[in-house]
Image: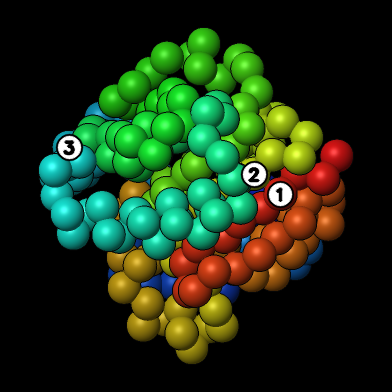
Amino acid sequence: MPTCPLCNSPSAGTFHQDKRRTYSRCTECALIFADPDVLLPPEEEKAVYDQHENNPEDQGYRRFLDRLAAPLTERLGPAQLDGLDFGCGPGPTLSVMLEEMGYNMAIYDPYFAHEPTALERQYDFVTCTEAIEHFYTPAKEWGQLIDMVKPGGWLGLMTKLARDLDAFVNWHYKNDPTHVSFFSRETFHYLAQRDGLEVEFVGNDVILLRKTQ
């Protein structure tokens, strides 16, 4: 049985299998993850991302991102705080929106804004929208995210939450070949307890975590 790429616990064997790949579910943290043998190589993964047409001038995309920005900034309070948008993609937009509100923003993306120095400091808050499901090595990336948040700071995430097997079988979200790590409420509760975080769910796909230590 494959080992969970998030918490290194054993999986419960095959959770679901479709025509393209097999998925396993961790017995400890409940992460659902795709068979590591079928993960796309970097050039093919980037080719999928290159098709995205994210643009800060797109008002519909701004409204989508505001589902995270609005509740997060309510909790952050006054501007002039330092933030990082991790996994900003080819058209950084959330960072632009937050800069317009007065926050000091840095960006990072392994393909489109590869600035490793951005990962070497701490921030008052870190955002990661529609990116965590792409993590091939989620233990590594999760550790990076947590380490970059100052004590008392916030981690704001946006990702579709996995549910039970019946829902997963017909879930369109799993069909994107770059979506490989599927988090659930149980997964975030596990991580919050393990890593000293307070977790809050806003709607169906926004997760806010506050670092308490």
Residue flagged by tag 3: what amino acid is it?
Asp
Q: Amino acid at mark 1?
A: Arg
In the picture, the disc for residue 154 is: 2
Q: Is residue 21 above or below residue 57?
A: below
The CA span between labels 3 and 1 is 32 Å
Q: Does residue 140 show up?
A: no
* One can see residue 64 in this view: yes
Residue 8 percent across, percent down from the top left: 74, 47
Going from N to C along the chain, the mark reached first, 3 or 1, is 3
Residue 153, given in percent of the width and then of the height, sits at 69, 39
Please report whichever mark, 2 or 3, sits nearer to the chain's N-terminal start: 3
Quadrant placement of the N terminus: bottom right
Instruction: Name the kind of residue labelled 2 in the image.
Output: Trp
Q: Residue at x 53, y 83 (%)?
A: 165
> 10 Å neighbourhood of mark 2: few (<14), some, or many (≥20)?
many
**Mark number displayed over residue 210:** 1
The Cα atoms of the two marked residues, 2 and 3, are separated by 29 Å
